[in-house]
Amino acid sequence: MDDVRVPAGPGIPNGLVIAGRDLVETFSHASGPGGQGVNTTDSRVQLSLDLATTSALTEAQRQRVIERLAGRLVGTVLTISASEHRSQLRNRAAARERLAALLREALAPEQVRRPTRPTRGSQRKRLDAKSQRAETKKYRQRPGRDG
């Protein structure tokens, strides 16, 4: 089985290589319509990676990935399914690409939001719009009413 390469990015400056021995592939019939071939070929691929035992991640990376992907994990095992292609080979490649993209996204550090203040011009514009709206509503009242 081939290794999965995760390209370098935020949180993984040198990239990441997940050894093929850490991955478990299972094959099954793809669901849905597909004609004669769908019942005879095992084209759906399920690619599983146990995040707790893989040697590709450091402890800090392991904690971050497990925390971020908690909703997708069964225990500590991450499973990716691919059945969009008719070919098992293409589904294997698609599952590996999806796994790499998911890990790259999970390992990226969170973006810190720095709060900003509205500019003086935008505050003035908002207040002018409010007073204009109040003026419009004031003129909709019945004449002679001092309310």
Image (cartoon, rainbow, N blue to C red):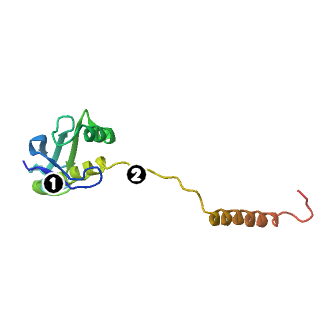
Label 1: which secondary element: helix
Please report the residue visible at 43 percent of the width from the left and 50 percent of the height from the top: 112
Is residue 34 something that shows in the picture?
yes
In this rendering, position of residue 84 left or right of residue 36? right
Give the labeled residue for mark 2: 111
Say what amino acid the circle numbered 1 marks: Asn
Q: Which residue: 16% across, 38% down?
A: 54
Front-most of 111 and 4? 111
Q: Nearer the viewer, residue 35 or 68?
A: 68
Q: Is residue 8 left or right of residue 29?
A: right
**Residue farthest toward the front in the current orientation of the protein:** 13
Name the quarter where the C terminus is drawn.
bottom right
Which amino acid lies under the numbered mark 2 shown in the image of this protein?
A: Gln
User: Distance between the Cα atoms at labels 2 and 1?
Assistant: 33 Å
Which mark sits nearer the N-terminus, 2 or 1?
1
Compare residues 18 and 120 and report the one nearer the observer: 120
Residue 142 relative to residue 50: left or right: right
* Neighbour tally class for label 1: few under 14, some 14-19, many 20 plus, Cα within 10 Å: many
Q: In the rendered image of this protein, does residue 104 appear above or below residue 76?
A: below
Residue 104: x and y in percent read 26, 51
- Expressed as whole percent of the image width and height from the top left, the position of residue 8 reads 23, 55
- Regarding residue 31, the answer to whether it shows in the image is no
Question: Which residue, as the protein is rendered here, is positioned at the far left?
Answer: 1
The residue carrying pointer 2 sits among few (fewer than 14), some (14 to 19) or many (20 or more) residues within 10 Å by Cα, namely few
Q: Secondary structure at mark 2?
A: loop
- Disc 2 versus disc 1: nearer the observer: 2
Residue 75 position in % (x across, y down):
25, 32
Residue hosting label 1:
91
Q: Position of residue 139 (x, y in %)?
A: 82, 67
